Amino acid sequence: MISRSADENGPGGERAYFTSIPGEAPVLELGGPDTFPQYSALGVRARYLDVAQTPAAPSDLTATGVSLSEIDLFWRDNSNNEDEFRVELKEQLGKGSFFNDIGSVPQNSTGARISGLPPGTTYDFRVLARNALGNSLYSNDATATTFTGATDPCVPDLTILCLNNGRFKVEVDWRIQGGEGSGMAEELTPDTGYFWFFNPENIEMVLKVLDGCNINNRFWVFAGGLTNVEVDMTVTDTETGAVREYGNPLHTPFQPIQDTQAFATCP
């Protein structure tokens, strides 16, 4: 008679099973990739049993508005045994909110396009992996806003920088302990400009918006700061209403911005 019992945990925390067959030494089966030589000292033959598991959770979820009605999701696939990925959207219910399953994409997917959304609306998403044994944990939440449609044309003034033939409007706000204000805009070239905060001879940050449509079908945003004050920068595509926001915390050296995925609004 063959008997099998869960007798103990393996040395790596795996569940161990002893299989007894008449006339043979017991066989220890473990959920893992290797055998453990220390079991030989017990007179037990060791081998591994492939233990099926639920998938590992996807991670690094990002969400980006790409049109008036569409948002693109991208994530890292951390499992090799999922059957599908389920996408959930946060919805309001009275004064509260909940995540609702809105559909799936096949195994090994690393992204999905969500369509049929109202314009100018912000959405929260999360993703999980699923197989026959159940669900993974959830990914992080990711937020994006659908485009609002064309806005008023960019008109340069003291605090507004218009770049890339006036298509992109750039505004900057700053804050220090005891004071705050708007950055003062100065154009250098059609796609490049800078802002000063306290003195026109003291440049605080330089930025540019480049047309990368022939390279990766995106407009790019690059910026560099010569400051450690708090900065909030807003870049608006006036042809589509798409907005990208960037920030720098107070008392922190301004970190370079090299966003080559900034605006999926070509041409």
Image: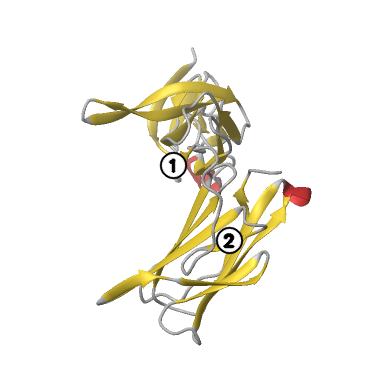
Q: Position of residue 23 (x, y in %)?
A: 55, 21
Q: Using the image, determine if residue 138 lies above or below residue 4.
A: below
The residue to which callout 1 is attached is 143
The outermost residue toward the left is 95
Q: What is the quadrant of the C terminus in the image?
A: top right
Q: Secondary structure at mark 1?
A: strand
The residue under the point 62% across, 56% down is: 166
Q: What coloring was used for the rendering?
A: secondary structure
Q: Which mark is residue 162?
A: 2
Q: Using the image, determine if residue 40 lies above or below residue 233.
A: above
Please name which of the two marks, 1 or 2, marks the residue nearer to the observer.
Answer: 2
Q: Secondary structure at mark 2?
A: strand
In the image, 26 versus 163, the foreground residue is: 163
Q: Quarter-wise, where is residue 120 in the image?
A: top left
Q: CA distance from mark 1 to mark 2?
A: 27 Å
Q: Position of residue 29 (x, y in %)?
A: 51, 31
The outermost residue toward the right is 214
In the image, 219 versus 153, the foreground residue is: 153
Q: Earlier in the sequence, mark 1 or mark 2?
A: 1
